[in-house]
Image (cartoon, grey):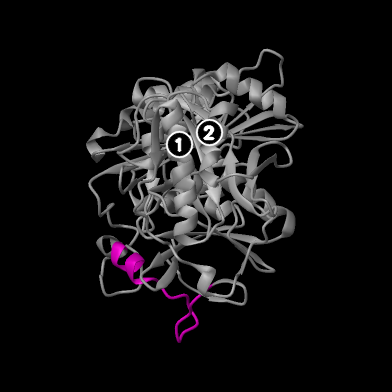
Amino acid sequence: MTTDATALTERRPDDDALRYALSAAGPGRALDATEGGGLLRVRDAAGHPLLAIGAPTEIAVPGEARRLLGPGAPTGPVWWTEVRTTLPGARGAALAGRFTARLAERLGGTAWPDPTRHDPGGPADTGAAPVPAAAHPAIDALTATSAVLLQDRPVVGVSPWLQDALRAVHKTGRTLYLVTPEHTRLTLPLYELLPTQPLRWVVRYGETFYDGFTGAALTWRDGGYAERTGPDGQPVLAAAWHDSRLPYLDDPHGPEPVSRHKALAGSAERRITFHVRTRHAAREDLVLGGALEAVWRAVTGGPPAGWGPAEPAGRPWSRAELTAMARERAPEPSYLLVTGGDAAASAALRIARTTAGVEEEATLTFGFASADAVPLQALPGIAAELAAGHGLRTLRVTWRATDAAPACAPLFPGLPAPLGFALGAGEPTAPRGGEPLPVTALPLGPAGRDGQWYPFGGGVEHWRDFRTLIGRLSRPMTDWSDGMTG
């Protein structure tokens, strides 16, 4: 398996510092850049790869390193340099550790992790072939249908390594399996990618494996992880996942989830999620990220802490810089991450140029210590602001009883419930005649010209009302989801 380590330094690594750190690999080592220049590779005299070094990234957002690495990481600004090695076991860990320690010694700072590590195990015992020396440095094993990436760290995010691995499997039609130990969490943006990408979170639990998103028990079969089924042919739930569902069950011994008429159960903490879709005319003076910032300010009282094209998202929040990156990437779409640093808040933003204009789709999530702390009274005002000034198409707001931290454990995440839904001007509207709607629309703007806000009661039973509303819109909506998974 690969081993990764990170140097968190006070100064930017320059060529001299890298050469000093590379002395950890011994004499006679060659250094070359990968295609595109995003990685440096260290090879031995025979040409075998020893280390892959990611480009140093400035983390100017307080708390961002700690969000991903845990409480032992520094809170202040640092330079983040990550390395990976395919050398086996203790040998690989020692080499990566020596490199990052020397870099920190030269530039000031610390190296992560400490020498004690857990082995997440995985397909090394299942028949997956180790990746050839020249293959992708983020991938541990390959089969005809699968690529396997092993990670053992407190939190796994949408890192440049993982983005590169996803691009690689897209090209070959494989599925990427992210294998972690049970103590690892995923950042919310990565967790939300799972159902949309050829990506599966595989959790090692003792000597067994299960899907960290669905709870399905897994086994290695025919070159990939497959769901185990019971005598009835249905997928088997892993024990850890099943046990975490018990607070949500009407009958702890029954097979069905909580009835739609039961209030949210489980944790006293709450996580509220905003799914926002906007559209703008393609103008030279267009500045993106406005809807995302408006929601963030309304919920937290201030702007996001930072953003970036990957995690860690280390750039201080700037809509102008975000827009410049999206313009540079156009006509290709942009996928950007937004962070609250130390705060329990994060977001993902997708930007695309279409025939209709410039489309933004943002998913923002905020954690609160209790239901009473969630600013529910602000929701109609948020909808009105988005409709009046940010080209709102749709806004869907949900919440769930679950851990407020902006990272997801491989356990049942709690049931989401709808709080409200808004339609901007020009979007399909519910008919006025016929059977009454299950919710009363609140007009947005003068005479409702900016759109409509539909408040829901915040219980899981209100999904029925939500679906009724969607089914009665004046024209079908094909680009939304009902939110039962988020």
Q: Which residue lies furthest to the front in this view?
A: 27
Image coordinates for residue 447, horizontal then vertical, percent: 51, 20
The percent coordinates of residue 349 (x first, y second) are 56, 34
| Contact flag, marks 2 and 1 (Cβ < 8 Å) | yes
Q: Where is residue 455 in the image (x, y as percent from the top left)?
A: 40, 37
> In the shown orientation, is residue 124 left or right of residue 464?
right
* Residue at mark 2 to residue at mark 1: CA–CA distance: 7 Å
User: Which residue is at 25% across, 33% downward?
Assistant: 373
Q: Residue at x 56, y 33 (%)?
A: 18
The answer to whether residue 451 is visible is yes
* Front residue (pair 55, 409): 55
Please name the amino acid that badge 2 sits on. Answer: Tyr
Q: What stretch is highlighted in magenta?
A: 226-244
- Of 478 and 371, nearer the camera is 371
User: Quick one: label 2 or label 1, which is nearer the N terminus?
Assistant: 2
On whether residue 230 falls in the magenta region, the answer is yes
Label 1 SS:
helix
Q: Name the residue that disc number 2 marks.
A: 20
Q: In this view of the protein, which residue sits in the foreground, 360 or 61?
A: 61
Name the mark on residue 117: none
State which quadrant residue 226 falls in. Answer: bottom right
In this rendering, is residue 252 above or below 400? below
Neighbor class of circle 2 (other Cα within 10 Å; few <14, some 14-19, many 20+) is some
**Is residue 275 rendered magenta in the image?**
no
Q: In this view, does 108 lie above or below 366?
A: above
Q: State the residue in front, 144 or 365.
A: 144
Please tell me which residue is depicted at 58% across the width and 75% down the height of the picture: 127
Q: Which amino acid does label 1 sit on?
A: Arg
What residue would you read off at disc 1? 102
